[in-house]
Image (cartoon, rainbow, N blue to C red):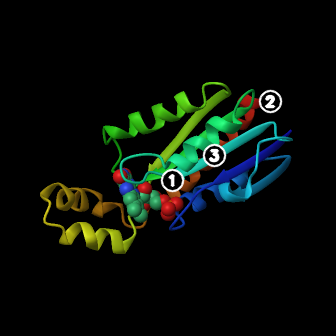
Amino acid sequence: MKTLVTYFSQTGNTKKIAEAIYDEITGEKDIKEIKDVSNFEGYDLVFVGSPVMEFNIPQKVTNFISKNVAGKNMAFFMTHAAPEGFEAIHSWTGSIEDFAASGNYLGTFECQGELAQPVMEMLEKSDDPEMKGFAAMVAPGKGQPDEAHVQKARQFAKEIQAKAQ
Ligand SMILES: Cc1cc2nc3c(=O)[nH]c(=O)nc-3n(C[C@H](O)[C@H](O)[C@H](O)COP(=O)(O)O)c2cc1C
């Protein structure tokens, strides 16, 4: 069984989860940024990872999935600044299941990832009370993903690989 772990990561949080998944996977495996992957050919299982940006999964990630997933075992992992239980998390992960509908979708991992400091400062200085409110809500996520989330990601990798075999 050959596995690909591929991700988009601007500030390193999703990359950290990608590396945890990659470490846990057994057998032949590759880890690559999405920009370096042209298709899923030759892989029996693909993990795709992304941050949430501007209240959505970036379109380049959703396009990448829908273009390549047909007939493939795929799992998705995501980091976001929103705290655990934030309502939109389900709609973000749910949208991926739709984009991956032509493949064999095996599951999702999501966890909080610290919001980059410059973005945090911009939100804090904003005149928009909604933006200020979002900054206050995500501030406790500093230091995420932590070791506990990394361990959960490893567990997720094991479970997905077992499903794909
Ligand atoms: C420009 C920008 C927009 C973001 N928008 C959101 C958002 O709408 N909702 C959210 O929960 N997190 C948002 N985030 C936070 C990221 O999803 C989070 O910090 C993530 O862990 C970053 O992953 P990365 O380090 O792999 O890039 C945003 C971050 C940036 C830089």
Residue 68 visible somewhere in the drawing: yes
| Residue type (three-letter) at the residue carrying disc 3 | Val
Image quarter in which the C terminus is found: top right
Q: Which residue is pictured at 55% across the width and 37% down the height?
A: 108
Give the quarter the ligand 1 occupies. bottom left
Relative to 121, residue 135 above or below: above
Quick one: label 2 or label 3, which is nearer the N terminus? 3
Find out if the beta carbon at label 3 lies less than 8 Å from the nearest ligand 1 atom.
no
Quick one: label 1 or label 2, which is nearer the N terminus? 1
Question: In the image, residue 123 lies at what x, y percent?
Answer: 24, 66
Considering depth in this image, is 146 or 43 the residue closer to the camera? 43
Residue 159 visible somewhere in the drawing: no
- Label 1 and label 2: CA atoms lie apart by 25 Å
> Mark 1 = which residue?
149
- Label 2 and label 3: CA atoms lie apart by 18 Å
Quadrant assignment, res 66: top right
> Mark 3 = which residue?
48
> Mark 2 = which residue?
165
- Label 3 and label 1: CA atoms lie apart by 17 Å
| Residue type (three-letter) at the residue carrying disc 2 | Gln
How crowded pointer 2 is (Cα within 10 Å; few <14, some 14-19, many 20+) is rated as few
Quadrant assignment, res 117: bottom left
Secondary structure type for disc 3? strand
How crowded pointer 3 is (Cα within 10 Å; few <14, some 14-19, many 20+) is rated as many
